[in-house]
Amino acid sequence: MVDTKAKVLIIGATGFLGTYMVKASIKLGHPTFILVRSLTYSDPAKAQLLKSFRDSGVTVLEGDLIDHENLVNVLRQVDVVIATVSGSGIGEQANILKAAKEAGTIKRFLPSEFSSIDLDKATIDFKEVAESSEDLGNDNLTSPPRDKVTIWGDGTAKGIVNNEEDIATFTLKAILDAGTENKTLHIRPKENRVSQRDIVTLWEKKIGHTLEKTVVSQEDVARITQETPFPNNTPHAVRYSVWVKGSQNFELASNDVEATELYPDVRYKTMSEYLDQFI
């Protein structure tokens, strides 16, 4: 009989994407564990978040990725590990693998690779990709602009945008699926394969008027990215990779699987539906 539930440990649970992973795990009925550092409680917002997790039945464990003995003890309590770390935590994921080998209980480990963007000297997580679609690819906006917009390159390169809740749902659907074992899971909804100009046009139709457009050439986007010191160049690097070079347009290899084909029952949010919240 195939197990339908797993004891799931989420590392990075109080971060942007980690929060959604916890909620998806709870919703799908998995016994859910999270690993947090003790200093997390010093942040009032995160302390409140941890309380809400506990109230939902989540087991909160303390520790970090550099305490090997404690990490082994934590991993012995679970079956699946999902890492949603960023920054220095990316490099420390090797510690998870080492501890998992000693623990001997881990059936699946999903590393923190929730982006199809590969950039030299930069770590790009899903938050960066999400923000670049929310503001139509423009700086420092929390909602799409209503007067003017900047187009990067010619604006026709296709990117893939996903709602964070859908990323989490597809991830948790995959953890016990034999068809995803030792494979790379891509989330590429056909309706959400769009260019920046596609998104702008869609937004213009929703608000009923045309935006003033300023076009920045491919060469200038590359120059700005190169001249801006890391990590401040990260948003520019995302734009150049996704909206100028079209880095998300590639054919899947034999070891790749696509989430919407594997799980057609998942009702994901389309780009159009995502923009509706800002009207």
Image: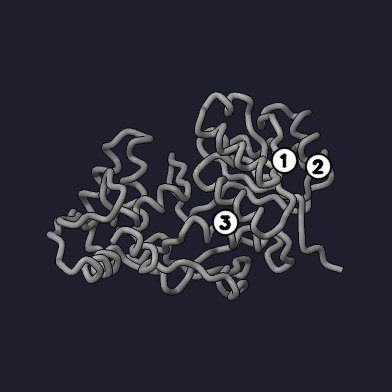
Q: Secondary structure at mark 2?
A: loop
Q: Secondary structure at mark 1?
A: strand
Q: Give the image location of residue 71, x and y in percent.
A: 74, 33
* Residue at x 46% of width, y 59% of height: 163
Q: Give the image location of residue 112, x and y in percent.
A: 58, 47
Spatial CA distance of label 2 from label 1 is: 11 Å
Spatial CA distance of label 3 from label 2 is: 22 Å
* Residue at x 72% of width, y 65% of height: 177
Amino acid, disc 1: Thr
Numbered circle sitting on residue 168: 3
Q: Give the image location of residue 183, x and y in percent.
A: 65, 62
Q: Earlier in the sequence, mark 2 or mark 1?
A: 1
Q: For this view, does 265 lie left or right of residue 107?
A: left
> Which part of the image, by quadrant, shows the N terminus?
bottom right
**Residue lying at the far right of the rendered structure:** 1
Q: Is residue 126 above or below residue 160?
A: above
Amino acid, disc 3: Ala
Residue at numbered disc 1: 59
Q: Earlier in the sequence, mark 1 or mark 3?
A: 1
**Residue lying at the far left of the rendered structure:** 212
Q: Give the image location of residue 98, x and y in percent.
A: 74, 38
Residue at numbered disc 2: 77
Q: Is residue 199 above or below residue 80?
A: below
Q: Secondary structure at mark 3?
A: helix
* Residue at x 50% of width, y 33% of height: 45
